[in-house]
Amino acid sequence: MRGKKSLLRLLVIGLMSAGLMLGGCSGDDGSPGAPGLPGQDGRDGQDGLPGAPGAPGNDGATILKNVHTLSNKVSFSQPSVQADGNDLLIRFNLKVDGVNNNSYTGINRAVVMQGVAGVYSRTAFDRSANYSNTIESVSSGNYVLRIARTAAGATAGAPLPASFFGTDARYYVRMAGAGLPNASVSFADEAYARVDLVSNQACINCHGDQGVNFGHHTFPFTAEACITCHAPVNNVSAAKVDHQNSLAEIIHGIHNSYNMPNNTYTYDASYAWKKVTYPTYMTNCSVCHDSTPALAAANQMPVTYANCLSCHGSMTNFSSNLPGSHATFTAAINCQGCHNGTTARATVADYHNGLATGRAGGVIFNGQDLSVVEGDKIDMTITGVSISGANMSVTWTATYDGNPVNPCNTTVGVGAPIFHAGGAANAATGQVASNMSFLRAYAQGDDWVNVGVGNAPGQPAGATNLTTGNTSCSANVATTTFALTAEEQATQATRGVVALQGKPQVAVSAPYSGTQNVVRTRAFTPTYEFAKSTGAAVDPRREIVDSRACLKCHVGSMYQHGGNRVDNIDMCVMCHNEASSEQNVRYLFDVTDAEAYDGKVGQTYGFKSLLHAIHSAGKSGRVGLTNDVAGRNDQITVLYRTNGIYAWGPSESALGPNWPGTGSQVVYGSTYLGTTSTNNPPTFTNNQPATIGHNFHAPTYPRFLNDCQACHVAGGYGLPDQGVAVATTVDAGTVNHANISGQADQSIADNGNQNDDVLISPATSACMSCHHTAVPSELAKREAHAFQMSFYPDDFGALNGRNEVLNFARGTVETCLFCHQ
């Protein structure tokens, strides 16, 4: 009966919402409703008890639009500078959100960085009462600033001569205005000659152009602005006895703080950064030094005490192969006495060349990840699918640098990649055995939820490895033929998707380590959507996220697990869908919701839920909750996996008293007969203890959380259409695990049955994954509103599970949309 009641609830909401929501959205008092929970914030009457008068509200559409639209974005243009006696006159046009703005009233910073014979130093103009840095005029956003000095001289830096204008210099001013972010204006003199080592775009790729996390500097803060103050020489901070106040040290230190002593980079007594979760590899210098001259300069960075410690933090933090005497070195040491290219390696590139990037299989050489560089040259394309009885045939092609190559090539070379047919691993050259395979998934609505085909909730049936037996080539076109599983053949899905997983390998022109010159490439994993009955091409799934947006931050590091799934969100969601859940692993571990670190029976790892939750996890208070709410205990996200338990949140304390801490910890579980190693499941025998890794991260997401287009395509965010977007699993119902000793394998039957899943609507899932809090009273308000405007968690089992939600929603409008357009 639970499913029938839920359908009635959907019908009631659909019929009542047009009349009731239009009043409730503007904050009117709630109208009496059918029995249920009371509503909040002027939105009573939707499946609830008669509501008390609602608090005055705002227009819902305006709320959603404003919250998810960045504002107060400052931009400037047409900067110029001229001398006027001993003063500078600086001119520019300034806009806020694209509109000329005259509201800035004060100058709180003015700096010039000058170069003399290629040596650059900075001078800050004094802000004391003796000085008169003023906004001389402003009209239609056109500002004229007078930066003045007197005979008393500047208190910060050496006094500037009267003729300080017109040389190799950069300028920076910062202005303030009531109710506005500080405005940073920075530009170079025409004679400025220094090569910029970091581009603005490299910073914007992760941080966006809104200045988030730049503290008092804010909008628009650029690499050029940073270097004006944080000049590379003649700029020693009094607070840092043996370090320069240089941009290189600060940026290296912040981004690599996780790998520094105590996981902390300390600038001075006031500023310290701990466990910054840099999303790629610090050894890949090209991520920030993204031009040929900049990367060349970075590669030639000499081995000095300050340069090495800018990333490593301490001499004791180096690898154990350094001579023990290094631990006693101080800033006074002359490293170049040994590190001169003859006695020992002389540059940073010398030391980084040949380093591996971890599970991603990348190799660093001359400041670049060769797996990314070579992967960008390889383009694999699935060209067709055909289905005949129990067999599927997939045709595919590949190019290198735009030129067709043979997918069945057996001999790796420079410009000649191998795919599945390259033979056995060869440690001498760096070649590994092929990991290429075809993964398939099947849709309900417009999402790959894999009803009844996999042995874990929401998961595909598995992958078929490419071999020389099932794959042949003709005229540079490969055809791979394999049998579909019985569950795939029986699925009621009408459409599917296939992905060509794996990393092609190619040789590089020179060895990157010893005799090794073959690299595994991060070539983009292609997908192809097809009709289940014939294999014919179908219209692609709706576009939500652009993989290229993810790769701006996650260079060479996106989707590491498995080692063969590379950089394509359309492939990721084949597994990371909203029907997924690791509840079967909790079942294996004998973990109840009362014992679980998050208090749940299971957790979906669908990207809509998981990525919102992870990226916002380190934000104190999450979205919409201020930091000073009493009893704040922010939301945590926990995944139980057989190769480790992973948790995200603002701090480990949010995980509760039963969290044992990070590292290998003892757990108990069913009589699971597995193997133990770093990346394999623990062994459980007769409920005896085993150990499994516990991992915790507090992500330091570097952008505003409402900057939706950091990841989403234009129009790809907002409330999901639940006529195509499936509901999210919060309880997978009856689950099983394939490898429990003494128990028949019911995993496909139990985990593939999604009619017993307890679901929440796609809009509720999307909104609450960010707008979550563990403050009970606040959480109750948010959940009540979200559930009332869609449906309460239910399994709809008698009515064909989530398909009933899809069928009902098609042709109707989810009630949220009456307010939140």
Image (cartoon, rainbow, N blue to C red):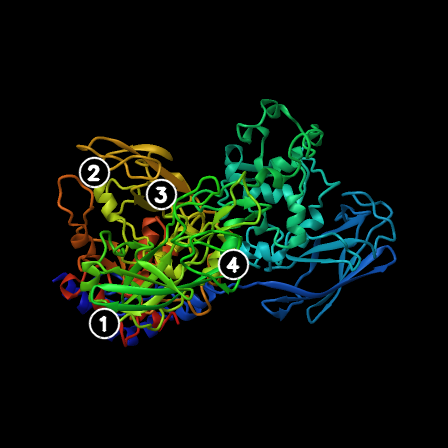
Q: Amino acid at mark 2?
A: Tyr
Numbered disc 4: secondary structure = loop
Query: Which of the image's four quarters has the N terminus?
Result: bottom left
Q: CA distance from mark 1 to mark 4?
A: 46 Å
Query: Which of the image's four quarters has the C terminus?
Result: bottom left
**Residue appearing at x 53%, y 49% in the figure:** 370
Picture coordinates of residue 275 (x, y %)? 49, 40
Camera-nearest label, 2 or 4: 4
Camera-nearest label, 1 or 2: 2
Q: Amino acid at mark 1?
A: Phe
Q: Which residue is mark 3?
A: 646
Q: Is residue 617 left or right of residue 580?
A: right
Q: Residues within 10 Å of mark 3 (few under 14, many from 20)?
A: some
Picture coordinates of residue 301 (x, y %)? 66, 41
Q: Residues within 10 Å of mark 1 (few under 14, many from 20)?
A: some
Q: Which residue is mark 1?
A: 808
Q: Amino acid at mark 3?
A: Tyr
Q: CA distance from mark 1 to mark 2?
A: 42 Å
Q: CA distance from mark 3 to mark 4?
A: 34 Å
Front-most of residues 37 and 268:
268
Q: CA distance from mark 1 to mark 3?
A: 36 Å
Lower sequence index among marks 3 and 4: 4
Q: Residue 611, located in which quarter of the rendered image?
A: bottom left
Front-most of residues 258 and 83:
258
